[in-house]
Image (cartoon, helix red, strand yellow):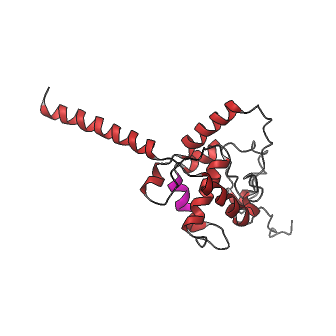
Amino acid sequence: MPLGMKRLIFLTVAGLAAAYTGSASADGFTAEQAEAGKSAYNSNCARCHGFQLEGPDAPGLAGRDVMMNWDTAGGLYDFISVAMPPEAPGELGEETYVNIIAYIMSFNGAQPGEKPLAVGDEMYEVSLAAETAAGASAASAAAPAEESSPATAVPQAFTWGKQLPGGPAPAAPAEAAKPSVPQAFTWGKKLPSANGQ
């Protein structure tokens, strides 16, 4: 076998081993972080995102589609640490944001581990979808089946007029003949028209 081919095989195997080792070392979060995160979430996030993460006034934070949307704990941290809460974006502190992420993961079925979640490169190795799916499947195997809760409508102001993945079925389309302002800019309210209608 040519030397170049051996190097290619070696580098491929080494890369796969490093990727596997990296994902295995990402323990997620601790139970203490999730508990502290629940308190911080209830104080700072629940008024918009709901106490059950159902999102009555802002997008829900529960469900597989939501977890897949953010991909990693680091991706979610990058967003909420600069944009949330809307009235004081980025002002909760690093530890509080990390704890809130731990709570969101826990609520979605991820199981706590021994290693705390911390800001850094390892945070980008914690797959939200994988962690929550693994935890949810373990929890569902141990728990009796429950009825699923009804979907909550999310105001279009927070979805930029688009349907959220896993959300309720879209309503019948509005009259297309009339030009309108996207509801994202009207917070779901109708604007008065020029002819007073």
User: Along the line of sight, which residue is nearer the eye, 155 or 78?
Assistant: 78
Which residue: 72% across, 58% down? 49
Q: Position of residue 6 (x, y in %)?
A: 18, 32
User: Along the line of sight, which residue is nearer the eye, 174 or 71?
Assistant: 71
Q: Position of residue 137 (x, y in %)?
A: 63, 34
Quadrant in which residue 42 is drawn: bottom right
The answer, for residue 180, to whether it is visible in the render is: no
The answer, for residue 25, to whether it is visible in the render is: yes
User: Along the line of sight, which residue is nearer the eye, 98 or 195?
Assistant: 98
Which quadrant is home to the N terminus?
A: top left
Q: Is residue 71 left or right of residue 92?
A: left
Where does the magenta region start and end?
73-80
- The residue at the far right in this view is 197
Which residue: 75% across, 52% down? 52
- The residue at the far left in this view is 2
Which quadrant is home to the C terminus?
A: bottom right
Q: Position of residue 101 (x, y in %)?
A: 60, 56
Q: Secondary structure of the magenta portion, mostly?
A: helix
Q: Is residue 75 left or right of residue 196?
A: left
